[in-house]
Amino acid sequence: MAIQSIEMTSKAWDCVLALRQGRIDETKPCGAVFELYGTLAQKTGPFVLAQVGQSLDGRVATPTGDARDISGPDGLAHLHRCRALVDAVIVGENTVTTDNPRLSVRIVKGGDPVRVVIDCHARLSGEEGIFHDGGTPVILFQSVAARPRHLPNTEVISLVPEAGTGLRPEEILKELAARGYARILVEGGAKTIARFVDAGLVDHLHVAVSPIIIGSGPTGISLPPIEKLSAAHRPDTKVFNLGSDILFDCRFSPQSLSDRQSDEISVPHGAKASRLFNGIKTV
């Protein structure tokens, strides 16, 4: 598997941003840069990207929750580029509590996405920084059974949860699409990313690996267990050298599971997110 090197210059990034804004349609310059970012930048319809930054041994934090500097500087820059290319970025309530993220674009040039928080059981207090930092609006999803919320700079959307599993990712994407947010980044945490992957709603999964070994701690993706490798996700994958980190760009499709059939496989994973948006106008 060939590894492509990302030679990111200000000119190359300006071209990507112009592509994002529909000001150019040329994707040939700066080869690997457009190979990595071109699909997301050009998308005008629904597209879901999930992003994980992890260590060589698959950890995203220490057992005490210290996640600072998991990604190297180029891995962080890549994450901020992804934020700049989407309409909205999604995290779970545990990520808000643990990391206190701003979910803004600060390291690179580009606009900030709308922030989306999944807080099914209304565990957040409302004192978290994301509600008071003066950034882009926040959309908070919670269960219809949760207590009413009145949070600054926040639209609260109540959904009926699926028994035993929480809010359905499909319903979250539909609500966002109805508000004009079609390009989505699912940034964390592990369970939130896993819910979208397991529902077959992720188009691309970016796994940025930093050359450190932590040895223990939480992992970046936590999917339900499988018994046989024939049930494993097998996306088409391209590899990019970001500099400080190596990025695996995993591209899902309805055929992204193993081609081998088994009795355990009844529904293919990796279905495109666009299936959910039929009849919904996006902008």
Image (cartoon, helix red, strand yellow):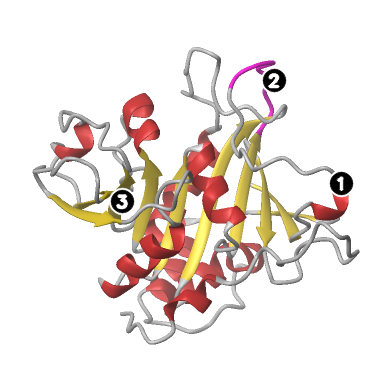
Question: Which residue corresponds to the image point at 61% horizontal and 30% vertical from the top-left?
Answer: 219
Sequence-first tag of 2 and 3 = 3
Q: Which label belongs to residue 228?
A: 1
Name the amino acid, label 1: Lys
CA–CA distance in space, label 2 to label 1: 27 Å
Q: Is residue 279 left or right of residue 139?
A: right
The image shows residue 245 at horizontal and vertical percentages of 64, 38
| Residue 8 seen in this snapshot | no
Q: Nearer the viewer, mark 3 or mark 1?
A: 1
The image shows residue 138 at horizontal and vertical percentages of 21, 50
CA–CA distance in space, label 3 to label 1: 35 Å
Name the residue tied to disc 2.
213
Name the foreground residue: 52 vs 72: 52
Task: Magenta stretch: give its range.
Answer: 210-217
Q: In the displayed structure, would residue 117 be above or below residue 7?
A: above
Q: Which residue lies furthest to the top in this view?
A: 64
Name the amino acid, label 3: Val
SS class, disc 2: loop
